[in-house]
Amino acid sequence: MKDNRIWFGPNGNSVPAIKRFLSEVKQGVVSKTIWFRTEVGDNQEAKKETLSFNNDEVFATPKPERLIYRALTLATNPGDWVLLDVWGKLQKPGAVYYDITWVGYVGAQAPPRHQEIFSVVRAARDAAVDFVAKAVARGETIRGYQVDDMARGVIRERGYGDYFVHRTGHSIGEDIHSTGANMDNLETHDERELIPGICFSIEPGIYLPEFGVRSEVNVYVGERSAGTTGAVQQEIVCLLP
């Protein structure tokens, strides 16, 4: 107080803060992180990109792919492993969420170890999806825990059962985690039936001390058919050429 180093805001009634004088602060450099639209795109470019895979306006202010790519390159280093868990829905009443997880490697090619673990997770995911699709086509009754058993069994057979530490999937609706059956025989024993009209995720994962892999898809159940909605990751995305 004696040295006039406490500041109480412009009106004198704010939370006190330590005052620093310009003469004591090392001169900085003017920011050079301005990204122009010619480099990273704009909202109009992003809207065209979203319309290429969906005729509805999914986001009010979408971000262009070039901008997202620039942000990823700044936030990562060569050799990094990236896991993106993304969810969203249309801006209209009754819209259902879309919830996916993809993985990528910052480099020209992912190491063999990463490819191995991804292949195990992919096999578990596909086995669970195939189990649901065939059972629905045959008119069989299936329950949430059975789907979890199918995915978990694949991972356990490959020796990574201890590293699959969550349920296989969750109910999806107007809420991202909805109230229907979960694909779960770990956290709970979900005996609820998979009935026509429901949607849920299938997202097995293996989480090693050095890195983790999860692959998440959404499955919709119809009267006599069931399958994934949207793109399904088949290979690790390499984020640098």
Image: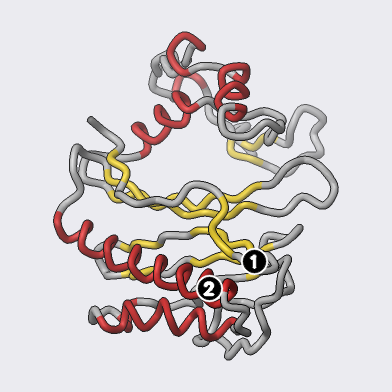
Secondary-structure class at tag 1: strand
Residue 26 or residue 97, whichever sits in front: 97
Q: Residue 163's spot in the image, x, y percent?
A: 33, 77
Q: Which residue does the numbered mark 1 point to in the structure image?
A: 221
Q: Which residue does the numbered mark 2 point to in the structure image?
A: 132
Residue furthest to the left: 112
Residue 129 or residue 17, whichever sits in front: 129
Q: Quadrant of the C terminus?
A: top left
Secondary-structure class at tag 2: helix
Hey, what amino acid is under mark 2? Val
Count of picture labels: 2
Q: Residue 235's spot in the image, x, y percent?
A: 30, 49
Q: CA distance from mark 1 to mark 2?
A: 9 Å
Residue positioned 73% across, 36% down in the render: 8
Does 180 sit left or right of 40 as displayed?
right
Report crowding for label 1: few under 14, some 14 to 19, many 20 or more residues within 10 A (C-alpha).
some
Answer with mark 1 or mark 2, whichever residue precedes in sequence.
2
